[in-house]
Image: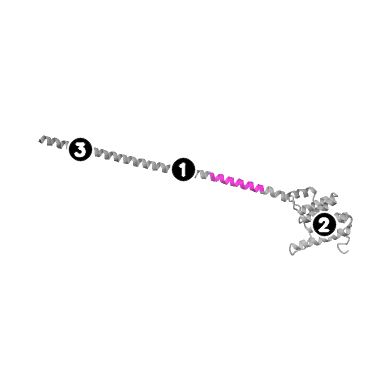
Amino acid sequence: PRSQRVTGVQTCALRSGSEAGSEADSEAEAGADSEAEAEADSGADSGADSGADSAAEAKAGEADSEAPSRLVRFASSLAVSCLLVASLALPWTLTEISVEAAPLAGPDAARWRLRVDPWDGVAMIAAGWASRRAGHTARARARVDEAVRMGAPRYAALELRAELHAGEGDCARARALFDEALAARAAAAFDEGVPTERLTLGGFTLPPSLVSECGGLGVPLAPE
């Protein structure tokens, strides 16, 4: 019986030792598993962070590379817009006819100006003078009437009318119309403001037919 008790005690001791060993092994395995999982999580987090950083750097690089291209596109668009505006404004400036130049402007100049600005009354006056020089009196009268409706200066229309009447031999009417033209020029000069220097009426000339057909104004311009 004593030997049996010893054997039982040894058996219990062996069992408890084996159980303790198995528990230690399980604890060691659990610790290893937890460490592995922690390392895996940390590796995943670091990989995700590095991936996010690289993506942010890539986007920043793209933004930096797009900035100069945007500037170049804006500059080219601005240059094209300026060229378009200049191309539209250049014909307007080049074809303009002044009131003083209208009596001597050619038919082509008047035609081109009316193509650019169909409502330019001064260009229509120039076309009327061109018709008068070509001997088309009826056309010249129609054009001076149209010029008045288009807003041409009154004195410019009166000068052309005086020329037309003088060409037909109606000298009295031609002189009266030219006198009205001079008064209209003076009124236009005063409308621009009170003159502080010597007043001039512009570079007007006598209508050619008023000189050639009617002998000019018919009265001396200054006392002899």
Q: Which residue is mark 3?
A: 17
| Amino acid identity at mark 3 | Gly
Tag 2's secondary structure?
Answer: helix
Q: Which mark is residue 100?
A: none
Residue 98 figure quarter: bottom right
| Amino acid identity at mark 2 | Glu
Question: Neighbour class for label 1 at 10 Å: few (<14), some, many (≥20)?
Answer: few
**Residue occupying the point 76% across, 61% down:** 189
Residue 182 on the magenta span: no
**Residue occupying the point 65% across, 48% down:** 82
Q: Which residues are magenta?
A: 66-84
Q: Which mark is residue 55?
A: 1
Q: Which mark is residue 159?
A: 2
Residue 166 figure quarter: bottom right
Q: Find residue 217 and report its horizontal and vertical position in percent.
A: 87, 59
Question: Neighbour class for label 2 at 10 Å: few (<14), some, many (≥20)?
Answer: many
Magenta segment's dominant SS is helix
Viewer-proximal residue among 143 and 218:
143
Among numbered discs 3 and 2, the one appearing first in the sequence: 3
